[in-house]
Amino acid sequence: MYVLFETLPDESRVWVYQSSRKFTDEEVAELEESLKNFIEEWTAHGKGLEASYLIQYNRFIILAVNQENQSATGCSIDASVHFIQELEKKYKVDLLDRMNVTFKQGEYITYKPLTDFKKMAKEKSVSANTIVFNNLVNNIGEWKDYWEVPAAESWHSRFF
C-alpha cells in the first residue's frame, strides 16, 4: 500500500539505490509511476506493505517500509531487488553497485568508483568536509540525519 513518504515513522526501514548517472526529468516521471505501481502490489506473506519512495537529485531511489504494521521479509526484499534490477536494464544504469561513491562538488553531484574516490582523498581533491551520500542508512531517521554528511562523519572517513 502506497503512502506519502512524509507520513512514515522514522523507524521505517529504508533502502537507498544510487544511479550511475542522473535521470532525465522524463525518466523521473516514468520512475515515479513504476515505483508507485510496484509499491501498490508489494507484499510480505500476502499482506500489503505500507511503503513509499522518494527520488532525490534525479539520482537516488529511496524505498521505505513501515515495519510497525508489516515487516519486509526475504521474499518481499527479493521482489524489490528484482524490481530494481528491471529498472537497471530499462534505463541502462547501475543501481546496485555499492563499490561507487556519490558526493557533492560544489552544487554538482559526482559519482566515482571507490578506488577513484580514495585516490582523490589522497590527492586532497576531496576532504573530510566533502559532503558524501551515506547509502548505508537503515531507517528514515538515519536517512534524515546521516545520509548527506561530511565524509568525516560517515564510513568514508577511513580515507582521510
Image (spheres, rainbow, N blue to C red):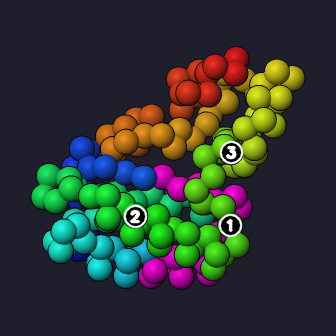
Q: Which residues are magenta?
A: 16-34
Q: Which mark is residue 93?
A: 1
Question: Which amino acid does the dot numbered 1 rest on?
Answer: Val
Q: Which image quadrant for residue 102?
A: top right
* CA separation in Å, label 3 and label 1: 13 Å
* Residue 25 in view in this figure: no
Circle 3 SS class: strand
Lower sequence index among marks 3 and 1: 1
Crowding at mark 2 (Cα within 10 Å: few <14, some 14-19, many 20+):
few
* Residue 141: in magenta span: no
Comparing labels 3 and 2, the label whose residue is closer to the camera = 2
Residue displayed at 54% across by 27% down: 154
Residue designated by label 3: 100
Residue displayed at 68% across by 45% down: 100
Residue displayed at 37% across by 82% down: 37
Lower sequence index among marks 3 and 2: 2
Q: Position of residue 23 (x, y in %)?
A: 65, 69
Question: Which amino acid does the dot numbered 2 rest on?
Answer: Asp
Q: Position of residue 57 (x, y in %)?
A: 58, 58
Kindly give the residue lying farthest to the left in the view shown. 69
Residue designated by label 2: 78
Q: Which image quadrant for residue 124?
A: top right
Seen from the viewer's position, the closer of residues 104 and 140 is 140
Q: Position of residue 99 (x, y in %)?
A: 66, 43
* Residue 130 in view in this figure: yes
